[in-house]
Image (cartoon, rainbow, N blue to C red):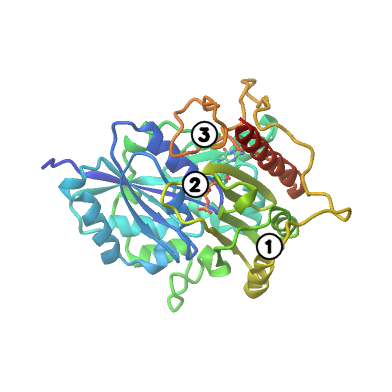
Amino acid sequence: MSEQQIPVVVLAGFLGSGKTTVLNHLLRRSADTRIGVIVNDFGSIEIDAMSVSGQVGSTVSLGNGCLCCVVDVSELDGYLDALTAPAARLDVIVIEASGLAEPQELVRMVLASDNQRVVYGGLVEVVDAAEFAATRARHPEIDRHLAIADLVVLNKTDRVPAADLKATWDTLAELSAGTAVIEAEFGRIDPELLFDCRPRDERAARQLSFEDLRAELGVAEDEGVHGGHLHAAYESLAFTSQVPMDPRRLMDFLDSRPEGLYRIKGFIDFGVADPRNRYALHAVGRFLRFYPEPWPRATPRLTQLVLIGSGLDAPALQQQLSTCRVSGEPATTGEGAPLLPEVTTPREATAPRDGAVHSAPALAADPAPVEPACDEPAFDGLACDEPTSDVSQGAAVARSMWGVLRYVQHQDREQDEE
Ligand SMILES: Nc1nc2c(ncn2[C@@H]2O[C@H](COP(=O)(O)OP(=O)(O)OP(=O)(O)O)[C@@H](O)[C@H]2O)c(=O)[nH]1
């Protein structure tokens, strides 16, 4: 048995900042490294665990709650024991925190672990460059998270003009002085940055006591340590449907989603509209994106969504989503014509900021193999990280998504005719 200790890296960041994207990138780009993953979702359907794929040594999924609240040190130790068993032969363990976790608490739990085979490997804080200012305004706690990070990944730089990034860099330099900050698009960072962590400083390396924690959090003696947590202000609800969703109705729902509904993620079954693919849905703030991907084998055809926000009217949202299910005849326009917009071929090339020409992702229904647009191998049905649609207005997403659906149907017809 190797005596070498296994680093445990904590991957944190606010809702939708790109933690799962970073994790998936690491899993794909660390060919010879065996990575164990502990995924913690804030929601009763484990969308993050379902979205993590690739070369993962072992995965432990901790659903329905925030890791820093629902798991204590001994429970975490149980998972670490399982992952560090010699048979697992892991080189590194990554804990993907929920988007509402207190990273300080997770770090403390790792440092407090009795497992002699693990060593704390650092805190990586993922920041959404496009939402940074707004997130800080709503959640000043973010500043505290950045202050204790070992590495800050300034993600989604493709969504921000280069000139506007300067202000974010200046703020990060202030908040996490001395900490490395790297820019990333779609979480593409060098895994070496994480697995070969730089030595930690004296303050962070020693085990944190609860008193330290209280002092850091500014929590009064009689106040629970979870009182000031981000997730105290947030709630989540899960929506599951075995009946396929109607694309038009769902888009209407997404277009009119309430302000407080900050994050939506999950998978959608559009039934006969596209029987071959499920659609991964990600909404962060007003930003929406769909990724069609082939239904994995032996996966039940379900729509599973997690909605996270503050001040949510959960029963009303459940009700609204229920009415988005397909019922009877497909929705039509006032004139009775089918609700299909003009086709935009999903193969259309787009020119991203770096000037390279990326083609849209391959569709499952497309018989011709398409090279992934990014510089990485395709995996588990996702052609690459590039979005099928990447726009903030639901209507445009609807158009783009319908374009994809229409294209798939067109392909189906052609195949049938052959
Ligand atoms: N434009 C753009 N989108 C990105 C980038 N990185 C991630 N995304 C998208 O942002 C959305 C959220 O990404 P995730 O990786 O699921 O974010 P997360 O932090 O794991 O989300 P939570 O688990 O809800 O906290 C997805 O649609 C991603 O494809 C990026 O660099 N640029």
Ligand 1 within 8 Å, label 2 CB: no
The amino acid at mark 1 is: Cys
Q: Is residue 197 left or right of residue 335?
A: left
- In the picture, which quadrant includes the C terminus? top right
Task: List the residue tagged with mark 2.
Answer: 295
Task: List the residue tagged with mark 3.
Answer: 383
Q: Is residue 221 visible?
A: yes
Task: List the residue tagged with mark 1.
Answer: 324
Residue 277: % across, % down: 55, 45
Q: Is residue 283 visible?
A: no
How far apart marks 3 and 2 lie (CA) works out to 13 Å
The amino acid at mark 2 is: Trp
Secondary structure of the residue carrying numbered label 1? loop
Quadrant for residue 170, please give it.
Answer: top right
Secondary structure of the residue carrying numbered label 2? loop
Q: Given the current orientation, which residue lies at the most extreme right position?
A: 335
How far apart marks 3 and 1 lie (CA) works out to 28 Å
The amino acid at mark 3 is: Ala
Considering depth in this image, is 183 or 407 the residue closer to the camera? Answer: 407
Q: Is residue 108 above or below residue 389?
A: below
Residue contact between numbered discs 3 and 1, judged by CB atoms under 8 Å: no
Secondary structure of the residue carrying numbered label 3? loop
Mark found first going from the N terminus, 3 or 2: 2
Residue 285: % across, % down: 66, 53
Category of crowding for the residue at label 3, using alpha-carbon neighbours closer than 10 angstroms: few (below 14), some (14–19), many (at least 20)? many
Ligand 1 rendered quadrant: top right
Considering depth in this image, is 209 or 401 the residue closer to the camera? Answer: 401
Mark found first going from the N terminus, 3 or 1: 1
